[in-house]
């Protein structure tokens, strides 16, 4: 394999292909995405390519992780281009089921993680993480992989999936990959294509705020979380189209909130804003 991409839309076909691969003793890396691939997704595929015999990309716009009023209906779909990019990145199999294939009947089993889902994005998007963990549990059963790849861009999602892998004994290792950014620092996201020219410019507030936080902590040795938050709020106030949703500063491993930046522990600084209709997130991991 490696020169062609096998594209499957059904669970049955995917399972039988995966069964043959497992019987041959090959390792499998799985990269779950919602498609509209960009260089962030590609970096996950390339990492998976380095670490596994077979790379599986899933493309599925998972309806149960969207709340009413979110962008499910307008979420970008670029399937043919995605398959081309996937092939270039060394993907072997694309699993692209329909909603009907994944959810033929009303779902009566859901996988819900407690604790880490309750803050940050979980506060505003009530059922979002249950939708994510349920679909990932299904994927892990359809494609029993050795390694599963997630981007730091959605750091909370990584923690939540790590939790189900530990708690439900899925035999996969979870791998966290760095945030890939555009030329000017904006984190790549499939949702960036919703932004008009002015909004795209204002979206730089996220990187500016994260850079400022890093500078305060590392260069100016500020330790008070409140002081850092005030500075960041000030930055966001300079952007007229930006509505701040949250600033989170806490322990990266468990999202425990903090009042002072501790030494020797990884700290997460996570931001969410909306700009017009578009919701954007970004974050920074830091240890002093
Ligand atoms: P999505 O298609 O947005 O659900 O994302 C699929 C995967 O790609 C998730 O693990 C994301 O965290 C990851 N991802 C999205 N954007 C980026 C980025 N800019 N850099 C690295 N990984 C990303």
Image: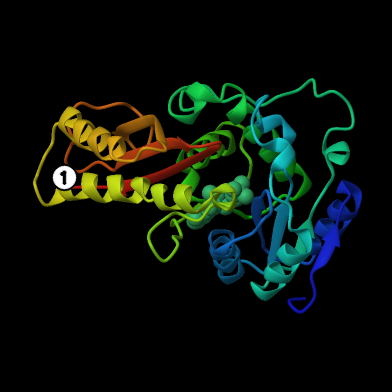
Seen as rendered, the residue at the extreme left is 220
Query: Foreground: 195 or 181?
Result: 195
Q: Residue at x 71, y 42 (%)?
A: 74
* Quadrant of the rendered image containing residue 179: bottom left
Q: Residue at x 67, y 55 (%)?
A: 36
* Quadrant of the rendered image containing residue 266: top left
State which quarter of the image contains the N terminus. bottom right
Label 1 near ligand 1 (CB < 8 Å): no
Q: Is residue 209 above or below residue 147?
A: above
Residue 76 in view: yes
Q: Residues within 10 Å of mark 1 (few under 14, many from 20)?
A: some
Q: Residue at x 56, y 31 (%)?
A: 167
Side of 15 where 221 appears, left or right = left
Residue 150 in view: no
Q: Where's residue 67, x and y in %?
A: 65, 26
Q: Residue at x 8, y 47 (%)?
A: 220
* Residue carrying label 1: 217
Task: Kindly state the secondary structure of the residue where label 1 is placed.
Answer: helix
* Quadrant of the rendered image containing residue 18: bottom right
């Amino acid at each position: 394999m490696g020169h062609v991409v096998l594209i499957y839309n059904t669970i049955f076909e995917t399972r039988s292909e995966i069964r043959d691969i497992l019987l041959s003793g090959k390792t499998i890396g799985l990269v779950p995405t919602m498609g509209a691939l960009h260089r962030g997704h590609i970096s996950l595929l390339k990492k998976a390519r380095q670490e596994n015999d077979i790379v599986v990309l899933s493309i599925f716009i998972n309806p149960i992780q969207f709340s009413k009023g979110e962008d499910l209906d307008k979420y970008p779909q670029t399937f043919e281009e995605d398959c081309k990019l996937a092939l270039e990145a060394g993907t072997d199999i694309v699993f692209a089921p329909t909603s009907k294939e994944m959810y033929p009947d009303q779902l009566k089993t859901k996988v819900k993680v407690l604790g880490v889902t309750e803050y940050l994005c979980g506060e505003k998007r009530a059922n979002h993480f249950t939708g994510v963990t349920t679909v990932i549990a299904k994927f892990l059963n359809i494609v029993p992989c050795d390694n599963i790849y997630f981007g730091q861009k959605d750091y909370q999602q990584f923690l939540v999936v790590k939790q189900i892998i530990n708690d439900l004994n899925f035999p996969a290792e979870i791998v966290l990959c760095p945030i890939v950014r555009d030329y000017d620092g904006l984190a790549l996201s499939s949702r960036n294509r919703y932004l008009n020219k002015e909004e795209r410019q204002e979206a730089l507030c996220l990187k500016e705020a994260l850079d400022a936080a890093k500078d305060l902590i590392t260069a100016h040795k500020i330790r008070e979380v409140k002081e850092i938050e005030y500075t960041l709020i000030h930055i966001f106030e300079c952007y007229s189209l930006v509505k701040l949703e949250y600033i989170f500063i806490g322990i990266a491993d468990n999202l425990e909130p903090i009042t002072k930046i501790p030494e020797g522990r990884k700290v997460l600084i996570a931001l969410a804003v909306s700009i017009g209709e578009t919701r954007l997130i970004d974050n920074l991991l830091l240890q002093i």
